[in-house]
Amino acid sequence: MASFKIFQSLLALVFMIISSAFLGTSIRLQIAGKDGIRNLISATCNHTLYFEMCVSALRSDPRSQTSDLVGLANIALNISIAHGSETLAFLKVLKSNAGNDTQLSGILSECTEEYIEGTENLEEAIHALRIRSFDDMNTLVSTAMTDSDTCEQGFKEMNRGSPLTDKNESFSKLCSIFLSITTLLS
């Protein structure tokens, strides 16, 4: 499982480096009122793999109405952290309902560890974004993405359906959105 996790981390990092070469290094927009902010969000989200999710997530935060690109990156990161925290709370409920199913309890414990590590990495990425340490930030967020993938893989390895598939995919996509936005800052 560890070699698979390392492989996924490296793959995510390579993807982000290649993506940044194609996405360009900045967005130049004239912002004028509310329409300008909507245009900034749309233009920013056009550089992500998940346009609809990006627009929906950013617009759900009232701070996006007055944010620049750095502000949108912060919002995207905060949304990713919140999703990770919500998933941890959901994992706690699942574990309490697992009863005597030791296999399920084991997988859920592994997922809990992965999400604790993943959200801690995202919290460290806040500082990396603040000081514009893009390499550190990419590594931290890519590792968080791998953590959710590792959780999902645990269910597959045990030939069990995962009650976390949607949450794992959303977490990974939110992290990807954040990384795509930060490529516009570098």
Image: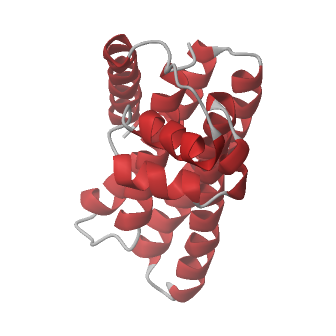
Give the quarter of the figure containing the N terminus.
Answer: top left
Q: Residue at x 48, y 58 (%)?
A: 56
The spot of residue 114 in percent (x, y) is 54, 49
In this picture the colour scheme is secondary structure
Can see residue 176? no
Give the quarter of the figure containing the C terminus.
Answer: top right
Residue situated furthest front in the rendering? 32
The spot of residue 161 in percent (x, y) is 27, 72
135, 104: nearer the viewer: 135
Quadrant of the rendered structure where residue 107 is?
Answer: bottom left
The spot of residue 90 in percent (x, y) is 57, 74
Q: Is residue 29 above or below residue 48?
A: above
Residue situated furthest left in the rendering? 159
80, 96: nearer the viewer: 80
Q: Residue at x 38, y 36 (%)?
A: 48
Q: Is residue 80 above or below residue 127?
A: below
Can see residue 129? yes
Quadrant of the rendered structure where residue 77 is?
Answer: top right
Q: Which residue is drawn at 62% across and 18% down?
A: 136
Give the left or right position of residue 84, taking residue 101 as reference: right
The spot of residue 122 in percent (x, y) is 65, 39
Q: Is residue 164 above or below residue 114?
A: below
